[in-house]
Amino acid sequence: MEEAREVRTTCPYCGVGCGVLAEVAADGTTTVRGDPEHPANLGRLCSKGAALGETLGLEGRLLQPEFGGRQAGWDEALDLVASKFSRAIAEHGPDSVAFYVSGQLLTEDYYVANKLMKGFIGSGNIDTNSRLCMASSVAGHRRAFGEDIVPGVYEDFECADLIVLTGSNTAWCHPVLHQRMLAARRERGTKIVVIDPRRTATTDECDLHLALDPGTDVLLFNGLLAHLVHTGKIETDFIREHTRDFDAAAALASADAPSITRVAKGCGLAAADVQAFYDLFAEIDRTVTVYSQGVNQSAHGTDKVNAIINCHLATGRIGKPGTGPFSVTGQPNAMGGREVGGLANQLAAHMDFADAAGVDRVSRFWNAPNIARRGGLKAVDMFQSVADGRIKALWVMGTNPAVSMPDASRVRAALAKCDFVVVSDVTRTDTTRYADVLLPAAAWGEKDGTVTNSERRLSRQRSFLPAPGEAKADWRIVCDVATRMGFGDAFAYKTPAEIFREHTALSAFENSGARLFDLGGLTGLSDTDYDAFAPRHWPAPEHRKKQTRLFADGRFPASDGRARFVPVRQEATAFTIDADYPLALNTGRLRDQWHTMTRTGNVPRLMANAPEPAVDLHPSDAAAHWLKDGDLAHLSTRFGFVRARVRVSEAQRRGQAFMPMHWSGQFAARASAGLLSSTVTDPHSGQPELKHVPVRIVRENTA
Ligand code: SF4
């Protein structure tokens, strides 16, 4: 019998990135608790994290490669994958293949997948499910700062005097951060304003709730910018010395939102509430604005992000403790994916294709003359290309697009039609049924690597269990395929530590300090140092051992060192509500579930609070549709239909319906919100509109 041991690792669910202590008893049973030494959570865990120990069973696990309706050995499965990809590339070119990957992957997994596709296959066609989560924030950061940077850190919540939560049900989606915010409210009187069409657990404990009409965020923040200008609450020295394009942004904001009355009318709010928000923002210097999927998952998500950032630049509230715009990510390693080029429009190490010198730099570093020279297909376009037959071979890693992608019926049809689909994952999912080859991946608790949380803090995930059956780490599977495709010299890694060393070296390679993404201080970590790696933020440049606050000197990573105001105007929502589809469907998350429930769905106590798919309706809407609480309803949009139980709730705004996004076929047939969602995307970020889709709802037995 083995000795009991305790392993420090990181929660695999949300972007808070909580530290976890996994205690493995001598008999092999594992319990988890929050790591009191991890700076993200200081010992706290939410309901999902606390139940991690109950997700370690082998139910539904893929234990051996499969193809042709039978179990297979790794060699024959990998040979088949490599030969199919190589043949598609030879016959149709590098853009005929694609990888669709996941914010669940560790940075080392992401790094080698990106290196294979962009560096050696020579296509930009690798995109991640983080496209559905925070791509608009990435685009907004790049427009404003010149680089994709989250300026703040979690300690800012504890020294802010005002926290504005917009498009974020933080209490359920980032619970440990919310606990930190509520502690600040209790202990130092921090005001909390919540901007959300719905009443949620987050609005239960706030000082002001603005239940605005969906999609009117730009108008609200343009009105705020205009108000700050008109009341003289802007920081003119900061604007003059550290920014550009203020006049254009302020003029457009004033034209768009000429008065509080107009803003209130346009947003569906009481003028007194808008005034109260503007007064708080104008008067309280230490203000953090937190935004998440309610802002990002929109056809105008990038403009929303920049409308928020504009207000922080105008007041100089950035680069100082307790201030700043703060995007929080949904997935555990959405940030790590951004760092290594997991998005199709990025290259690696926060470089992108628009920078020819950067492409050349990565090409030389990887010794990859065939490197892609332009970005690839973003998620929605990627699956459209699969449907059109332009993508001949697709590899899905650790994600379930048959449920989570918008217009999921179309995605399923595309997967069914595609010449060759590989799925590497931990368990069987709705997507694995479309796989020509299934590859068993190691799960949380079985693999080693790093993740980066929403505050740019790198942490280790460490293995504490052996991988069952023949499951392998994702990075290993990618490298094995790369080797069989003839790229073995560049993928001869033996450990994730080797990959991490290369990643850090690339970030510092010929980096003159112009780019903030720099891990030069972590290059050359020994295996022992990597094993012992303690959580820390980036940037971590070689010449600076101590973390200092980003933008504290007022310099931004644009070529002239200045941040940009981005003039934005309120646009109409992508869809209008009409008589055929009279309600607006909003989607979101439950407190106790994660993504498509492949792990949390197996924990009875996490299922207890919401055991079946439900749609929330305001009482007046329910009555107008002859529905009562508990009825089974048929919901349809122009993209598809689902069935769900009606929950009548005063928390729901009139005219809107809300459905959680989690339900997959394993747990409830025909209940995935992805079947209802639209493929309309933000023009800057490629992120789909998931918050405002016209929907019709009728009682199931009358459908
Ligand atoms: Fe895990 Fe997020 Fe919960 Fe922390 S807040 S325990 S990272 S799910």
Image: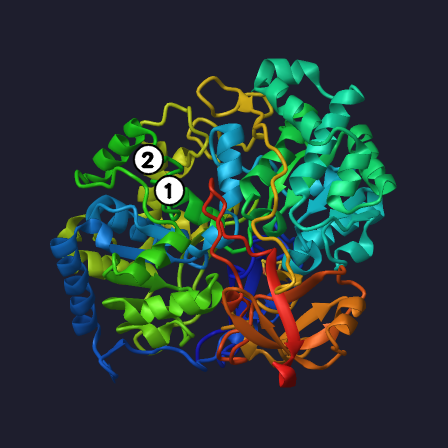
Residue at the spot x=71%, y=46% of the render?
165
Whether residue 132 is visible to the viewer of this picture, yes or no, is yes
Classed neighbour count for the residue bearing mark 1: other residues with Cα under 10 Å, few (<14), some (14–19), many (≥20):
many
Label at residue 353: 2
Q: Are the residues tagged 1 and 2 within 8 Å (C-beta)?
A: yes
Looking at numbered disc 1 in the image, what kind of residue is underneath it? Asn
Q: Quadrant of residue 315?
A: top right
Q: Quadrant of residue 358?
A: top left
Which badge, 1 or 2, comes first in the chain's sequence?
1
Secondary element under disc 1, as helix, strand or loop, is loop
Residue at the spot x=53%, y=20% of the render?
562
Q: Quadrant of the N terminus?
A: bottom left
- The relative height of residue 117 versus residue 30 in the rendered view (above or below) is above
Classed neighbour count for the residue bearing mark 2: other residues with Cα under 10 Å, few (<14), some (14–19), many (≥20):
many
- Of residues 271 and 60, the one drawn nearer to the viewer in this rendering: 271
Q: Position of residue 65 (x, y in %)?
A: 27, 76
Looking at numbered disc 2 in the image, what kind of residue is underneath it? Phe
The residue furthest bottom is 701
Alpha carbons under labels 1 and 2: distance apart:
7 Å
Residue at the spot x=75%, y=77% of the render?
626
The residue furthest right is 272
Whether residue 33 is visible to the viewer of this picture, yes or no, is no
Quarter of the image where ligand 1 sits: bottom right
Residue at the spot x=76%, y=37% of the render?
263
Secondary element under disc 2, as helix, strand or loop, is loop
- Of residues 275 and 233, the one drawn nearer to the viewer in this rendering: 275
Q: Position of residue 89 (x, y in %)?
A: 16, 54
- Of residues 548 and 683, the one drawn nearer to the viewer in this rendering: 683
Label 2, ligand 1: CB separation under 8 Å:
no
- The relative height of residue 542 versus residue 598 in the rendered view (above or below) is above
- On screen, residue 278 versus residue 165, left or right, reads right
Label at residue 345: 1
